[in-house]
Amino acid sequence: MNSIFENTATAFALKKDAELERAYFLFKMIANEPLVRIGTAMTNFAIKAHLPVEGLIRATVFDHFCGGINEKDCMPVVDKMYTKGVSSVLDYSVEGKDDEDPLDNALETILNVLDFVKEKDGIPFAVFKPTGYGRFALFQKINEGKGLTDSEKEEWARVVARFDKTCKKAYDLDVALLIDGEESWIQDAADSLVEDMMRKYNKEKIVVYNTLQLYRWDRLEYLKGLLEKAKLESFKVGMKVVRGAYMEKENNRAQEKGYKSPICISKQATDKNFDTVVSFMVDNLSDVSIFAGTHNEESCYKLIKLMEEKGISPNNSNIWFGQLYGMSDHISFNLAEKGYNVAKYLPFGPVRDVMPYLIRRAEENTSVAGQTSRELNLLKKERERRKI
Ligand SMILES: Cc1cc2nc3c(=O)[nH]c(=O)nc-3n(C[C@H](O)[C@H](O)[C@H](O)COP(=O)(O)OP(=O)(O)OC[C@H]3O[C@@H](n4cnc5c(N)ncnc54)[C@H](O)[C@@H]3O)c2cc1C
């Protein structure tokens, strides 16, 4: 078992030679940190200046990391991946909009996605992030336990209504719903809202999944508390488990404001925390569902091993593995080939609006962040195998 991820023929079976070459070229470019920095600045400038760069972006990074500009546009990718047993999570990746209009637009988009995916076997989940549905500062104010003004109370009621409308629709249509995790200083407010949704919609099946960011050292305790409440009140817990994407921001803020950082003291401590929480969840599989969102091979192997030890079949509907589209195909496609449940986040949105998402992917794939050498080596190995 300990080498299933090395099979590059399975990992890249869907990529034609030309697509493999494009991916290789792309990862070579983004391995170069100065180039990414300059490229990011130039792209931001070009977009702001309305220069005609969208075609170029679309043909390169966009097509590698995104499914299309709208949900229909994503279908060829969804269908293709599903022929290999890999499902998709359509992810509307437009971020950082604070006024009401974009929030309502996000709601409309997610509701449309739910309608769109309801009868599509290849798309078992929808996803949104809390600040897609409410203003960041409002979440923060609630998180800090500060009183709201009358108009803020009304605004919050609209946020709650957006969550409820989405979760109810997901429940009615039988589509599972992942809710992303964000910065710790808004997360308590989001958590308690998502808990209410689980209370309402996770009675007989698991529809609503919150996210546990396991670079946070307090999450096991949080999960244990939640599970106790769930058992007492007869609802089930859906959880996406990830390590967490805001580490630097979290540590910087804690240092600036002089409180203890919520982040584990080292990468090893985060890894250990991840394993401990996943193991706790597997032990409680009758009450929880796991969506393991990770590109870490070791974490995937450990979860596989736990499943084997406990006689849990690979396609048990309470355990999913998740990766991002355009990354770690060696994990996704090899797991799917062995019968495990796998879904890739497939971002979509207008090219200029998904730029922040694309820039983050490029940055996390620079040689500094270290992911790229792995992607590059795998692509290289497959090129050599195909002799191209
Ligand atoms: C399908 C999917 C969904 C996701 N959804 C979310 C989400 O909702 N919210 C969110 O925040 N992120 C989300 N992420 C991103 C995720 O949190 C990680 O940033 C990313 O996946 C890298 O972690 P890893 O487990 O893949 O692997 P690795 O590369 O092994 O881990 C890297 C991670 O380890 C942690 N880390 C690194 N150095 C240290 C250190 N010195 N001390 C402590 N910890 C350290 C950080 O979290 C870092 O991102 C998602 C990822 C995937 C694949």
Image (cartoon, rainbow, N blue to C red):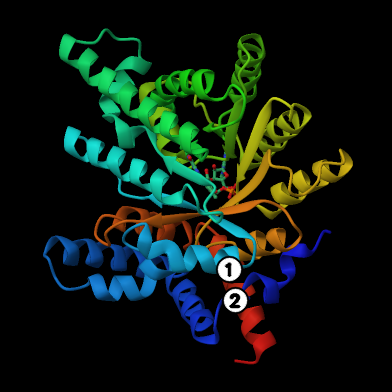
Most distant residue in the left direction: 49
Whole-percent x and y of residue 270? Answer: 63, 37
Q: How far apart are labels 2 and 1 at the CA level?
A: 6 Å
Q: Quadrant of the C terminus?
A: bottom right
Residue tagged by mark 2? 379
Q: Amino acid at mark 1?
A: Glu
Q: Position of residue 337 (x, y in %)?
A: 72, 63
Position of 148 relative to 178 (above/below):
above
Asked if the residues shown at circle 2 and circle 1 are in contact, with their CB atoms under 8 angstroms apart, the answer is yes
Snapshot quadrant of residue 164: top left
Amino acid on which the number 2 mark rests in the picture: Leu
Q: Quadrant of the N terminus?
A: bottom right
Q: Which residue is mark 1?
A: 375
Q: Give the residue drawn at x 30%, y 68%.
A: 39
Foreground of the two, 373 or 208: 208
Q: Quadrant of residue 145?
A: top left
Indicate left or right for 169 with 21 as reference: left
Which sits in the foreground, 65 or 105? 105
